[in-house]
Image (cartoon, rainbow, N blue to C red):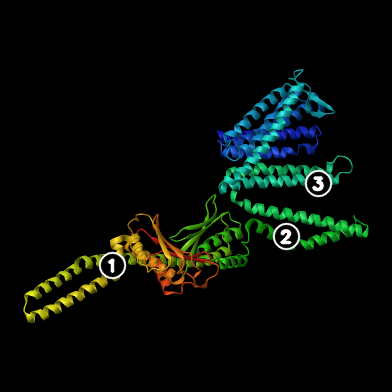
Amino acid sequence: MGRRLAWTGTGVTVLAVSGAVVFGVANSADPGAKSYLVFVVSCAVAGGLVAGARPRNGLGWMLLGGALSFALLELCAEYAVFGAFTRPGAVPYPHLMAWPETWLWVPANLCVALVPLLFPDGRLTARRWWWLAGPFTAAAAVAAVLGALRPGPSGQLAAGQGVPNPAGVAGLGAAADVAGGVFTVGAGIVFVTGGIAVIARARGSDDAGRRQIKWVAWAAAVAGLVVVARLVAGLADADGGSPWPRGSLLWEYAGAVALSLVPAAVTVAVLRHRLYDIDVLINRTLVYTALSACLVGGYVLIAGYLGALVGRSGSLSVSVVAAAAVAVGFAPLRERIQHGINLMLYGRREEPYTVLARLGRRLEQAVTPAAVLPVIAETVAEALRLRYVAVEVAGGAAVTVGEPAGDAARLPLTYHGETVGALVLWPDPGATPLLADLARQVGVAVHAVRESERSARLSVDLQRSRERLVMAREEERRRLRRDLHDGLGPTLAALTMRAEAAQELAGDAAKDLLARVVDDAAAAVGDVRRLVEGLRPPALDTLGLAGAVRAHLAALPPGGPRVTLDTPETLPALPAATEVAAYRIVVEAVTNVHRHAPTANAVVALEVVDTRLTVRVTDTGPPMLGRGPSTTETDNKGPFLNGVGLVSMRERAAELGGTLVFETGAWGTRVSAELPAVAED
């Protein structure tokens, strides 16, 4: 039903336009004034196609309604003039047929003005547009009613007379003029606002939506160029009279044909037939528009210069020379313009060497492996004028630039037959030799990044394994010390005492043997004690870290620097390895203070924050090792670590995954270490 109604409306519109043309010829109407009927027919055909294929899309019905209104308006006007002035009495009711002309222009312009707001799916995209479309429609209804009752002649003129409105009401002329003016201004506002809304929607549209808008924008741009060219040509040909001489009839119809591209583009955009050819069409349009402008401008300049030089501006020789110069410059100029347009629209897709060279230079400047993938994505997006580029790594994360608005193209990245990732591009640049070369180069880079990341992960895993081994070693040492101290030590001591008791009861021969047993047992006890003390400082198990440090500071020889301890009353339970490393670092740092700054004051600070133990030894002595006025060495790197004690501190912190910072300056020296306060699982 909808398709039949749509094509019926299209047929009625075409018949009405044909009738208007026939009556216009009989009325000797200006052909240029009827050129817009070409646009009316194109709107009718476009409306029929859209409404027939998409009956629920109001855009097609608006195009068809506007075209039908314009066609009936023109038919009724020419019919009235024909019956009232050209051949009076030849047709019936000529004055009655003048009445539709007074109000049909309102629905015609109403439909055309609402087209941008309804593009592309025939609905208002937001509730806020109802606040614009609603009052505008009400103003249209008022203008149509007052226009239908406006007294006086209609707009069509014949022999200087207008056909009077048969339904005119005296006194409504001024009100009708005001309502018509308000509606006309409102139509312009609604049309322009709708165009701005279409452009704004392009940002949030997907790929198909953007191409729909591209089609309409291309058609509008071509129509605008033709209209401007028509205006310039009319002004240039004016000879003091009207700027639109009769010779501009060709320009009138050229402008009408150009305007007809807009409803044609709307049809393509809505029905999405050959939608993806718009990029090629835009490219060719830009090339030939720029080329035509350059050639025409060059011809005018050359002809004008030679004419002024020889004094015969209109001579055949001057025209021939100018035409020859333009012809010679056509090919190179077209090539340069084509290259510039391609560069603007597609980037350097046709220059694979340039793209690969730029990518190579930027990869050379990448400081770290982590910066390689962002450099690749940014370079590809910039070189190929793409809105979205993603470099995906197999089994890893992806690095992206921009946001896709549609289906993207995927290029597999391989290295020696192995798929190492994918290069995702949007919009799809199509199949070009550049992409194959680019995929090979990017595949090598992605493989290198994968290997680098794998090495980094292995290094991290190795460090963690080392930390776990150290933690386990110290925990085992603590267990061994406890077992030796609480088990084997007391057993050997008891054995010694039993041997001594037996020695008192035995004879002289047995006493010598038992004396040797007592001596051997005492030596074994001493060895066990030395083993226990070597495995782990005994004070750590009896006093804890803070107590052990406090005991060590109290046992320092007198006459040295004054060292104080700054620590909380209680420290949380710490891993055995952390306790040993912290204690050894404090002992070594305090020893350095005694050695290098015997007259200084020092502070030992212990603090647990979250999962880290901070050990800090600060003194007010002179800078160590002859360093400058202020120096900082972080992560245990630098020439200051040339002493055995400092190397030992560095290694103790590093084997637990901690850090050691050495600072020295005019204010003194500080050694700071951060160690794990919680053992990893």
Question: Please, what secondary structure does the residue beneath circle 1 have?
Answer: helix
Q: Which residue lies furthest to the top in this view?
A: 170
Using the image as rendered, state which of residue 469 and residue 596 is in the foreground.
596
Which of the 4 quarters of the picture holds residue 84? top right
Q: Mark 2 points at which residue?
A: 334
Q: Mark 3 points at which residue?
A: 232
Left or right: 624, with 316 as reference point: left
Out of 419 and 68, give the one closest to the viewer: 419
Q: In this view, does 376 lie above or below 2?
A: below
Spatial separation of the CA atoms under disc 1 and disc 2: 84 Å
**Left or right of 473 on screen, residue 170:** right
Using the numbered discs, state the Cα–Cα distance from disc 1 to disc 3 in whole angstroms.
97 Å
Residue at the right extreme, as displayed: 311
* Nearest to the observer: residue 479 or residue 25: 479
Marked residue nearer the N-terminal end (3 or 2):
3
Residue 27 % position (x, y): 80, 32
Q: Quadrant of the C terminus?
A: bottom left
For disc 1, the marked residue is 477
